[in-house]
Amino acid sequence: MLDDTVRELRHLLSPADPAAGGAGVPGAGTRTAGLLRILATPAVTEAAHTRRRPVRRRWFLAGAGAVAASVVTAGVVLVAFDPVATPAYAATPAPLTYFPAGDPGPAALERIAVAAQAGTATPAGPEHLVVESWSLHGQVDGERVTSAVVPVVREVWRAADGSGRVVERYGAPVFRSEDGRRAWQQQGSPGADGKPRETVFPAGGFPGMWTDRPPAEAAALATWLQTGHPAGNGPMETLVAITDLARERVLSPAERAAVVRVLAGVPGIASTGAVTDRAGRHGAAFSVVSDRSGLPTRYTLILDPADGRLLGYEQSLTTEAGKLDVIAPAVIGYEIYR
C-alpha cells in the first residue's frame, strides 16, 4: 500500500519533479484494497477508542481533499455527527439478491466468452465510458452517524492519441432511513446539485494504468493485467485488475472474450448466481473470497451473459467488520459500468 501511495503522489507531483516518471497510477480497486488493510489493522492502544469529547453536529462531504476525517477512495459518503457516545454505523447499500444458476463458474464463463467473441464491433471514435461508484471510507469512533450513500458518476472520453476528458458528478443519494434524509435536507443537502468537475488531458496525457490496448488472447492478457497488480496478492487481484481495465477502455468482442476467459482461470472463482444489478440489468455474477484486505471479503464481478460486458463490481464483508463502522455482512463498495 505504501508503494502504491508513493507512486500515486509522484505521478500527481511529476510536473514539478525533474526526477519523476515511469510508474503508473494505482487503480481505484488497488487503493480500496489497501485502505481495507489499514482499517482492518488493530490500533496500537485502546486509548483512542475510550476518549470522548463534545462534537458539534455537522455535515461534511468527503472528497479528494478530505484526509483528516476520513480516507477517500472511489466514490463519496455523506455523514452527520451527533455528540452521543453510541456505536457508529455508516450507511451501506442494500445487498443484491443472487439466484442459483446451477453451472460452476468456469463452465458458465466459457459460454459467456463464446457469446462475447461473436458480439458486434466497438464503434469508431473516442472511447466513451460511464462508471458509477461508491466506496466505504472509514469510521468515526464513539459518535452516532447518520449517513447517506452518495455515489460518484465518472464519465470518460479517451482518444487514440492518449488525449481525453473526464467529468465527475455526484449521483442521487441513498439513505439508511427517513431520519437520515431529513437531517441531510436540514443541513442544505450538500452535494445534491450534481455540479460536474471536468478535467481535460492533452495528447499522451490520459492517466491510464496501461498505455497500449489489452491483448485479445487469454494467456497474454493474464500476464498483461499483472502491471500494477502483482499475482502475489492472490486471486482477487485479477478481479481488481479487470475492474481497473473497465475504467479505462471500451473493449472489442475479442478483448471481452479474453477477459472472461482470464476470469474463468482465477483460482477459486465460483458462480454466485443470476442477479439484477443496481442499474436494473440482468447479469451473471462470479466471485472469489479473500482475506487479503485483513477482513474476509467477497469480490464479485457481474457480466452480461449475452455479450460478456462487465456490468458491475461489488465488494462485501462476509463475516466480520473489524474496525469498520458497519455490521457484517455488508456491501462496502460497488461500481456500475454503463
Image (cartoon, grey):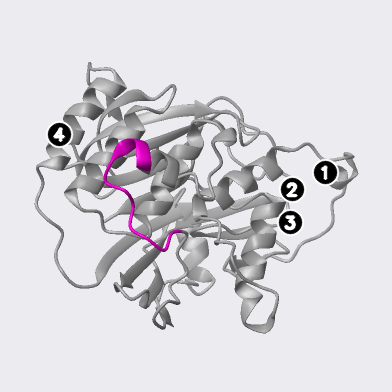
Mark 3 secondary-structure assignment: loop
287 relative to 49 in the view: left or right = left
Look at the image and tell me whether residue 58 can be seen.
no
Report how far apart the C-alphas of labels 4 and 1 lie in the structure.
53 Å
Report how far apart the C-alphas of labels 2 and 3 lie in the structure.
11 Å
Q: Which mark is residue 114?
A: 4
Report how far apart the C-alphas of labels 1 and 2 lie in the structure.
6 Å
Disc 4 to disc 2: CB gap under 8 Å: no
Comes first in the chain, label 1 or label 3: 1
Disc 1 to disc 2: CB gap under 8 Å: yes
Q: Residue at x 28, y 17 (%)?
A: 104
Percent across and percent down for residue 252 are 20, 53
Q: Which mark is residue 141?
A: 2
Comes first in the chain, label 1 or label 2: 1
Q: Can residue 216 be found in the magenta stretch?
A: yes
Q: Which mark is residue 49?
A: 1
Mark 1 is on which residue type? His
Residue marked by disc 3: 83
Magenta part of the protein: which range? Answer: 210-220
